[in-house]
Image (cartoon, rainbow, N blue to C red):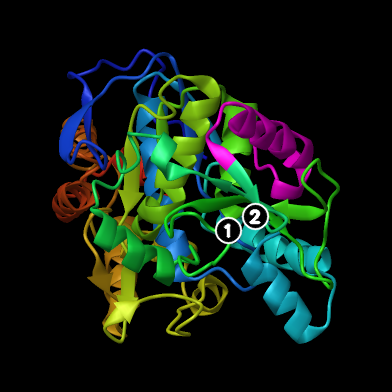
Amino acid sequence: MADLSPPDAPLSGPMHLYDTSRREVVPFEPGPVVTMYTCGITPYDATHLGHAATYVAYDVLQRRLRDRGHQTRCVRNVTDVDDDILRKARQIGVHYLDLAAAETARFDSDMKALEMLPCWSEPRATSAIADIRKMIGTVLDRGHAYQSHGSVYFDISTFDRFGQVSNLDRDAMLVLAADHGGNPDDPAKRDPLDFVLWQKSAPDEPAWDSKWGPGRPGWHIECSALALRELGETLDLHGGGSDLVYPHHECEAAQSEVVTGKPFVRHWMHQAMVRMDGAKMSKSLGNLVFVSDLLKEHDPRAVRLAIVAHHYRDSWEWDDSTMSAAAERLEAWQSSPPGRAAGPAAVLDRVRASLDDDLDTPSAVAVIDEAAAAGGIGPAAALLGVRLP
């Protein structure tokens, strides 16, 4: 990987990023070491372009932060025990951990091909069972949870900041809870929006012993336990796809803050959805473009260019012309003799300015397009993770 700039690269003021919770673009001014947590995959199927778009966004962010002189510690979890992976393992007749291992290996291969910066840590949910049980015990002891029918639920009525991340009203939360596995019709709950911390396992599901009976973790508690264990009580930035704002990230914030008594996240950043056939790419709908399939026919750098041509907060539609346009752009960038035109430092500064403006990768791409036409890209493409000769 090419060096981007010296560690003491001059700064032109703070970086600005949109904060989901505050609903505005605000300065992002972390300390020398930036702690970041991005929600990872549930490894029960191949990596699709929506996954890649999410991780490319945080990869570019890390590249620019490092270019500004920061160290980055990015943790990305692997949800290796979850309703979806258990359902798929049951369908195909394999052990859920064997399925997780195979699909995680395929995901890692895709990320390596796309030249993603390695994560600082990539912990598995099953590595944190002890941490999860301890955290649930604290939530219960402090009066923010209750036991019911062999499971443990978070009581949202005890947390007056519930809604701080998503800014949604109750009706909207109920709709999204139903759509994203929140199970608002669960009769064991006191309130439909209460969420599970520890759930009683079905007879053919994995189970761990606990004070509340044998069971397995809820989805949200896994990420909280891993984030707190790996990065500490308050994270500089937490990210993921925009479909995770509610319920996942809202619930993470609530349960984490009742345990630590401190803000869980300073800055929430979310990647918009990639659509196909008029709907977001999702495994449940089957409207997917798999990264491994794209890599069989296209240069991985062209796949990155197809993604960074769109702003991370803009949802966009995949079609057959997407990769041809990206391949043409890569060819134009590669055929531009480096350094032929004067001013590669100015090009780099303009790209830096674009990325500091809410990670505006389309503007950065346009700057490099212009420089390629003039024959002087210099090192600017490396900030987007695109390696040129």
In the picture, measured across the screen, residue 39 lies left or right of residue 348, that is right
User: Which one is earlier in the sequence, the residue at label 1 or at label 2?
Assistant: 1
Q: Position of residue 354 (x, y in %)?
A: 18, 39
Labels 1 and 2 touching (C-beta < 8 A):
yes
- Residue sitting nearer the eye, 270 or 316: 270
Label 1: few (<14), some or many (≥20) within 10 Å?
A: some
Label 2: few (<14), some or many (≥20) within 10 Å?
A: many
Residue at 16 percent of width and 49 percent of height: 363
Report the Cα–Cα distance between label 1 and label 2.
Answer: 6 Å
Residue at the spot of label 2: 79
Asked which quadrant contains residue 340, the reply is top left
Residue at the spot of label 1: 41
Residue 86 makes an appearance in the image: yes
- Residue sitting nearer the eye, 263 or 333: 263
For badge 2, the amino acid type reads Thr
Q: Position of residue 60 (x, y in %)?
A: 38, 43
Q: Is residue 179 above or below residue 267?
A: below
Q: Position of residue 121 (x, y in %)?
A: 64, 36
- Residue sitting nearer the eye, 126 or 62: 126
- Kind of element beneath mark 1: loop
For badge 1, the amino acid type reads Ile
Residue at 27 percent of width and 65 percent of height: 329
- Which residues, given as a range, are shown in magenta? 119-145
Q: Main secondary structure of the magenta part?
A: helix
In the picture, measured across the screen, residue 79 lies left or right of residue 126, that is left
Residue at 73 percent of width and 38 percent of height: 133
Q: Position of residue 24 (x, y in %)?
A: 15, 38
In the picture, measured across the screen, residue 317 lies left or right of residue 299, that is left
Asked which quadrant contains residue 18, the reply is top left
Q: Please tell me whether residue 130 belongs to the stretch shown in magenta.
A: yes
